[in-house]
Amino acid sequence: MTALGGPAAHALCQRLGAAARELRSGDFPGGRHAFAEQVSHLTDTELEDVARAYALWCHLMNIAAAELGVDGVRELCGRSRFFRGLVRNCEMSLVRSDIDVAREYAFLADPEAARLFTLIEAEHARTVAALTVTLGITTPLAARPYLASSVARRNHALDVLSHAQIEALRRRRAGAPDPERLGRIVFTAIGGIAAGLQTAG
């Protein structure tokens, strides 16, 4: 991070990363709204530094995970029975998704589209309840601590990237003077989030 944007960028990323960890543990004063407010005060340069640094961090995490043999673990999981595979996919989707972050994105939508989030939120709650009631799964991935640990290591970076992207989108839609740069921030964050979630984006 220091090499990317200098000591100031490194200090900023460290500060936001620490705040995101507190947010994840429930210790950040004011919760997600206060965290989003903190991101909203960043300059475009700071927003770009943060997006680039945490996108790179997520890519490096993927490289490290591959070195530790995650592919072998995935192959083993792939040989399980259909329903168990379905449940495991569902668990992973729940762990990767964050309904609070989704709500922040929904605030960017027009009222008509934002109403869709109500349906998504309700379906998310039903899925969590179904796993708990039918299979007794109260903590997704509890049976696979190596994956839960991998997801937990990435979550703080995903929070920073998500809020950087939300803020860049908000500024771009508000007619900020440098839409091209804000567009780059959005796409950098997309790449970083995809790397952090280990999806295609």
Image (spheres, rainbow, N blue to C red):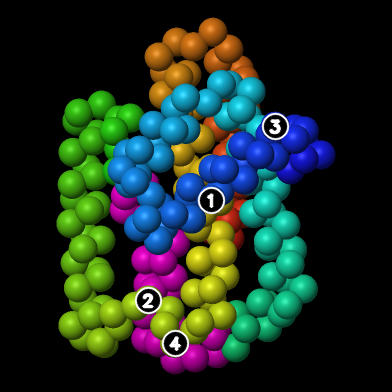
Q: Relative to 143, say whether 107 is above or below.
A: above
The mark nearer the N terminus, 4 or 3, is 3
Between marks 2 and 1, how big is the CA–CA gap?
24 Å
- Where is mark 4, residue-wise? 143
The N terminus lies in which quarter of the figure? top right
Q: Is residue 112 visible?
A: yes
- Where is mark 3, residue-wise? 8
Can you tell which mark lies on residue 140?
A: 2
- The kind of residue tagged 3 is Ala
Residue shown at 49%/84% (left/top)? 144
Q: Quadrant of residue 10?
A: top right
Q: Is residue 197 magenta?
A: no
- Looking at the rendered structure, the secondary structure element under dot 1 is helix
Between marks 4 and 2, how big is the CA–CA gap?
8 Å
The residue nearer to you, when weighing 59 against 39, is 39
Residue shown at 41%/18% (left/top)? 173
- Looking at the rendered structure, the secondary structure element under dot 4 is loop
The mark nearer the N terminus, 1 or 4, is 1
**For residue 52, side relative to residue 80 (left or right):** right
The mark nearer the N terminus, 3 or 2, is 3
Residue 12 in percent (x, y) is at 61, 37
- The kind of residue tagged 1 is Ala
